[in-house]
Amino acid sequence: MAIIRTYRMNEKNELQFREAWFQQFEDEELGQFVVNHGPVGHMSQTSEVQDVTADRADELFAGFAEACAAEGYKELSDQEQSWVIVQYALKTAEGTARDKYLQNKATEALAGHLAWRGLGTVESSDFGNRKLNIRILSPAPKLAVNAIKVCIREAKLDFTKMVIATAPYDGLDQARMAYPMPPKPFSLD
């Protein structure tokens, strides 16, 4: 699935996003072209064009990119974004079956919740030394931290063992705890 994700600051200094993707279902010639947009941190609005061929999707992508550029939207490089790390303390070094369930459930819940609000993408998750780390790349880390807390509560996942940290893209070693407060030392290891 190809996707174009763009951002801009509006006249009120609020970050907005627009994204488009083309999705074809298995063994089907036609797919759908989807445009999703809104202020970052809020549930987006979506419009779809059904029964689209791959060639027509290319035309729609070109038109989408042209319209975005004309209105000041641009794709962000990784370096223009920040890391948000959701970390769970575990009882074992490698994680149990329950921890693997938590990893899958939390990753899935966060991916959808953050994407529909323009807050970023889940890039990876892994088990470290008695820790589960979920790494999110976000254009708005402060807003993402608040959204993560809401998402984890709504998904009825364990909130008490979770910490959230933020770091610059090129400085994971500089991660600082953003939740809970007051901040304590944070480490991925």
Image (cartoon, helix red, strand yellow):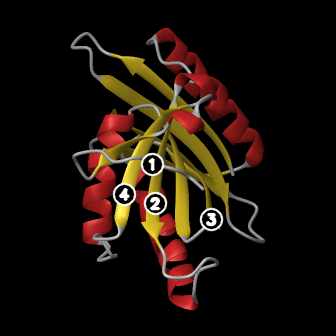
Residue at image coords 63%, 64%:
126
The residue lying toward the viewer, choosing from 65 and 14, is 14
Q: Is residue 161 above or below residue 172?
A: below
- The disc at residue 163 is 4
User: Residue 185: x and y, percent?
Assistant: 41, 46
Query: Crowdedness of circle 3 by 10 Å Cα count: few (<14), some, many (20+)?
Result: some
The residue lying toward the viewer, choosing from 100 and 109, is 100
- The disc at residue 186 is 1
Residue at image coords 69%, 58%:
30
Contact between marks 1 and 2 (CB within 8 A): the answer is yes
Q: Which residue is mark 2?
A: 87
- Going by the picture, which residue comes out furthest to the bottom? 97
Q: Quadrant of the C terminus?
A: bottom right
User: Residue 84: x and y, percent?
Assistant: 46, 44
Q: Amino acid at mark 3?
A: Gly
Contact between marks 4 and 2 (CB within 8 A): the answer is yes
User: Residue 134: x and y, percent?
Assistant: 53, 58
Q: Amino acid at mark 2?
A: Gln
Q: Which residue is mark 3?
A: 128
Secondary structure at badge 2 equals: strand
Between disc 3 and disc 4, whose residue precedes?
A: 3
- The disc at residue 64 is none
Which corner quadrant of the image does residue 139 belong to?
top left
